[in-house]
Image (spheres, coloured by chain):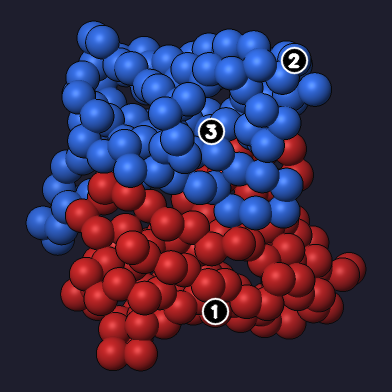
C-alpha cells in the first residue's frame, strides 16, 4: 500500500514569508509526528498528534510554528515569518499502535520522504 | 528532557568485519529504543528496536543490547556488507510519545 507522503518535496521561500508543509500519513495510522532534520544531524522532534489533537507540541521552537490535523489524517505544518535558520528537511512519520505476539505495545514509525525547506 | 548521545560519528570497517555503534540516554523513564538506517537522500527506516524489559534482541546480522542501569544501548552489525553503508540513528522514547534521536553515525563498509 501507499506509504507516508509529503508535499512539496522542495520549497524555496524568502525570509519573512509564510509556508505550509503537508503530510499524508498511512491510512488508518492514528499517531503522526513532525520532525526537523538539519544537515548531519538526527531528526529533532517538533510535535506529535494522536488522532486530531496535539498530544505533545513541546518541540515546536517558537510561536512561528504551528501544526494541525483537523480530521485525524492529513496534517499541515505551518511556519510564519520564516527565517534562514528554519532551513532544514522537515520529516513526517505515522504509526499505528498495537500489541505484538508477546503482548508488548508496538509502534513502528514510518517516515515520509521529507520536505526540503530553503529560506533565502 | 531526554538527551541522547551517539558515537562514533563516523565508522569505517572492512567488509565482513563487525561494527558497533553506541548510544547513551539520560531519562530513566525512556522505555523504547529504536534504531534507524538512513541512506543518502532517503527517509529513515526502522531496522531493529528494543524495549526496556529485555536486555538483548537479535535479527539475523543485527543485534541491539540495552543496559538500563548504565543507560546505554548499542547496535551490533556482524559480517558487514557494502550495502550496510548508511547513516544510523539511535532514538529513545517514553511510551512512544516524543522520540529523541542521536546525532547519527556514518558507517562506511569498504569492499
**Distance of label 3 from label 1 (alpha carbons):** 24 Å
Mark 3 or 2, nearer chain start: 2
Q: Residue A5: x percent and y percent?
A: 51, 19
Vertical relation: A21 (above or below) A35:
above
Tell me the quadrant of the picture where the N terminus of chain A can be found: top left
Q: Secondary structure at mark 1?
A: strand
**Distance of label 2 from label 1 (alpha carbons):** 40 Å
Most distant residue in the bottom direction: B70
The dot on residue B74 is none
Residues at marks 3 and 1 on the same chain? no
Nearest to viewer (mark 3 / mark 1): 3
Q: Residue B36: x percent and y percent?
A: 53, 54
Q: Nearer the viewer, residue A80 or B92?
A: A80
Q: Secondary structure at mark 3?
A: strand
Task: Work out whether residue B26 can be spotted.
Answer: yes
Residue drawn at x 27%, y 67% as measured from the top left: B30
Residue drawn at x 73%, y 47% as measured from the top left: A39
Q: Residue A110: x percent and y percent?
A: 43, 36
Vertical relation: A115 (above or below) A61:
above
Nearest to viewer (mark 2 / mark 1): 2
Task: Work out whether residue B73 can be spotted.
Answer: no
Q: Residue A71: x percent and y percent?
A: 23, 9
Most distant residue in the right direction: B111
Write down the residue under mark 3: A91
In the picture, measured across the screen, residue B110 lies left or right of residue B23, that is right
How many numbered circles are shown? 3
Write down the residue under mark 2: A14
Write down the residue under mark 1: B22
Q: Colour of chain A?
A: blue
Residues at marks 3 and 2 on the same chain? yes
Q: Nearer the viewer, residue B36 or B100?
A: B100
Q: Nearer the viewer, residue A9 or A97?
A: A9
Amino acid at each position: 500500500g501507499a506509504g507516508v507522503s509529503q508535499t512539496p518535496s522542495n520549497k524555496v521561500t524568502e525570509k519573512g514569508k509564510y509556508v505550509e508543509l503537508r503530510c499524508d500519513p498511512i491510512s488508518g495510522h492514528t499517531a503522526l509526528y513532525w520532525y526537523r532534520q538539519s544537515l548531519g544531524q538526527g531528526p529533532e522532534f517538533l510535535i506529535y498528534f494522536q488522532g486530531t489533537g496535539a498530544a505533545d507540541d513541546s518541540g515546536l521552537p517558537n510561536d512561528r510554528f504551528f501544526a494541525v490535523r483537523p480530521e485525524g489524517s492529513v496534517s499541515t505544518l505551518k511556519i510564519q515569518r520564516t527565517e534562514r535558520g528554519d532551513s532544514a528537511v522537515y520529516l513526517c512519520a505515522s504509526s499505528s499502535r498495537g500489541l505484538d505476539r508477546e503482548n508488548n505495545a508496538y509502534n513502528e514509525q514510518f517516515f515520509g520522504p521529507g520536505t526540503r525547506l530553503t529560506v533565502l | 528532557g531526554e538527551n541522547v548521545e551517539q558515537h562514533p560519528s563516523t565508522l569505517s570497517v572492512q567488509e565482513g568485519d563487525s561494527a558497533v555503534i553506541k548510544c547513551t540516554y539520560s531519562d530513566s523513564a525512556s522505555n523504547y529504543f529504536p534504531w534507524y538506517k538512513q541512506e543518502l537522500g532517503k527517509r529513515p527506516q526502522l531496522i531493529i528496536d528494543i524495549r526496556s524489559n529485555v536486555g538483548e534482541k537479535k535479527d539475523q546480522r543485527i543485534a541491539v543490547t540495552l543496559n538500563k542501569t548504565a543507560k546505554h544501548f548499542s547496535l551490533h552489525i556482524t559480517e558487514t556488507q557494502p550495502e550496510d553503508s548508511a547513516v544510523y540513528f539511535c532514538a529513545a522514547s517514553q511510551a512512544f510519545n516524543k522520540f529523541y534521536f542521536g546525532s547519527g553515525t556514518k558507517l562506511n563498509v569498504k569492499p
